[in-house]
Amino acid sequence: MSLILAIYGKGGIGKSTTSANLSAAMALKGAKVLQIGCDPKHDSTFPLTGHLQPTVIDVLDSVNFHLEDVSKEDVIRTGFAGVDTLESGGPPAGSGCGGYVVGETVKLLKEFGLYDKYDVIVFDVLGDVVCGGFSAPLNYADYGLIIACNDFDSIFAANRLCLAISQKSQRHKVKLAGIIANRVDYEYGGGTNLLDQFAEKVGTKVIGRVPYHDLIRRSRLAGKTLFEMEGPGKEECTRPFEEMAEYLLAQPQATVPQPYHDRAIFEAIGGWR
Amino acid sequence: MSLILAIYGKGGIGKSTTSANLSAAMALKGAKVLQIGCDPKHDSTFPLTGHLQPTVIDVLDSVNFHLEDVSKEDVIRTGFAGVDTLESGGPPAGSGCGGYVVGETVKLLKEFGLYDKYDVIVFDVLGDVVCGGFSAPLNYADYGLIIACNDFDSIFAANRLCLAISQKSQRHKVKLAGIIANRVDYEYGGGTNLLDQFAEKVGTKVIGRVPYHDLIRRSRLAGKTLFEMEGPGKEECTRPFEEMAEYLLAQPQATVPQPYHDRAIFEAIGGWR
């Protein structure tokens, strides 16, 4: 049975870039990895493949939603380091119901028998988890992972995600493996001082610190993973992913987080300087 | 009848901070402004009020969803410079249906007769517009506004929002007033070179350039608008909002954008250096 990771975090926090580089790092250590983008914007896997692949919705639409006419090869591509990729897709912005599509994609994996075919499956789930559909990956995951920066907004969103994970853990196996600190900036952004305090308070820990570095912005524009980029700072940027891959593949202990109440964390963060 | 603005943009791009400071700037020019947060995270208006106010959902829940038992005073607060504030709220992360709540809030305003009571109404809508509910504000708005940074992801999301606005403009009065460039960083982020090219190609323009400045991050932590902060860079940070307030209050010409196809913009941005 695959090790299943579900990666969440506030919109725009760097989930897709982090997921793609984590998938690549685990594949470079020999794991057979499948990354699944769960976002109508279907832009999760392009750093691995270099293009926007057909989505599950595109393919279902082309066969008038006859699921039985869809094969794995229609929806799965292979990217850098042999990572397989799949995008749920969804309706155009502002119409239809994106959550429904993610729920259907999670079921489709079961029908394809994919949960047994990979060493690791990575769900990269969009930022605003605004309905039940977007939490469906937590029903299958071993670990939830939350990406956050050292600022109020992403910690506030991380706290809400801790609540979702703690609720899901009552009926499913999922636990929180930890927080991945992104855009860590010791000069202007306070390093990870707020994140470390938050992690300790809710009963988890920071398991990786990815630097704020322009190489990462450029890798995203180039549609590549960091492992394929050249230039100063490459080792500084790839090392956290190699360390996290090693840590997660060893299947570490995880926890059921104890989130703050929404308003309590508001006061708490306000007091952390 | 109020001038109604609907502010959209990729998750984490700075919508709430920008909306709050734009509302404050318009109020300081004498306009009577109402800002409405349309996000289950209900963290849109706190830079104006300094706290997380009760949401429409909180109040409806307390009266067993008897709409007739809800008064304006239950859901509206007043913040900096006399800006009135309202938060739709929504279900906890990963459950229920956030889009439904936003759709209901937009209707509630009509029942309260609020569309005639303000000079300006600002809808701050969450990042991932994953269903019809979150596009409901576009049914009432005069102007859509898109916030973006000079990077691939926010331009990719902005393009999808242009599609949503162009579709809505076929049945409603809404048009795109322009793009607000946020976190403009000429040293490391390329200034607005990608955004300017995108704006020109889809038939709109950049109407404001907010700098990448730590005063803005600190204002968010302090739960204040930039106008209430002290320290170096204050004028540099507030001036773009004063200019945008003046521009929008003069009710400028707006356009129906001509978005790229999803995959076409992917190639196009890849080619812009």
Image: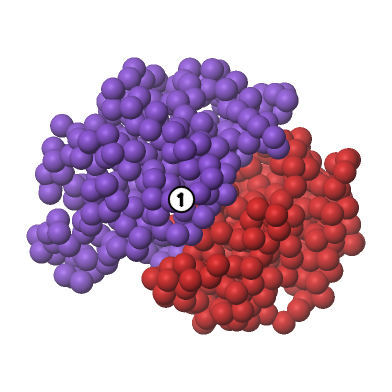
Chain colours: A purple, B red
Amino acid at pointer 1: Glu
| Chain to which the residue tagged by mark 1 belongs | A
Task: Using the rendered image of the protein, determine whether residue B245 is visible from the camera's viewpoint.
Answer: no
Count of numbered tags? 1
**Which residue: 83% across, 66% down?**
B243
**Which residue: 68% across, 61% down?**
B191
Residue B218: image location, x then y, percent: 75, 38
Specify the farthest residue to the left. Answer: A68
Nearest to the observer: residue B81 or residue A15: A15
Q: Mark 1 points at which residue?
A: A230
Lateral position of residue A4 relative to residue A187, left or right: left
Of the 4 image quadrants, the one containing the N terminus of chain B is bottom right
Residue A151: image location, x then y, percent: 63, 36
Nearest to the observer: residue A256 or residue A26: A26
Specify the farthest residue to the front. Answer: A231
Residue A183: image location, x then y, percent: 57, 40
Of the 4 image quadrants, the one containing the C terminus of chain B is bottom right
**Which residue: 71% across, 28% down?**
A270
The correct choice, above or below, for A22 with respect to B14 in the image is above
Task: Using the rendered image of the protein, determine whether residue B13 is visible from the camera's viewpoint.
Answer: yes
Lateral position of residue A114 relative to residue A50, left or right: left
**Which residue: 63% across, 42% down?**
B43
Q: How crowded is mark 1: few (under 14 residues within 10 Å), some or many (20 or more)?
A: few
The correct choice, above or below, for B248 with respect to A98 in the image is below
The correct choice, above or below, for A248 with respect to A7 in the image is above
Residue A212: image location, x then y, percent: 58, 41
* Quarter of the figure with residue A89: bottom left
Lateral position of residue B80 relative to residue A199, left or right: right
SS class, disc 1:
loop
Nearest to the observer: residue B175 or residue B263: B263
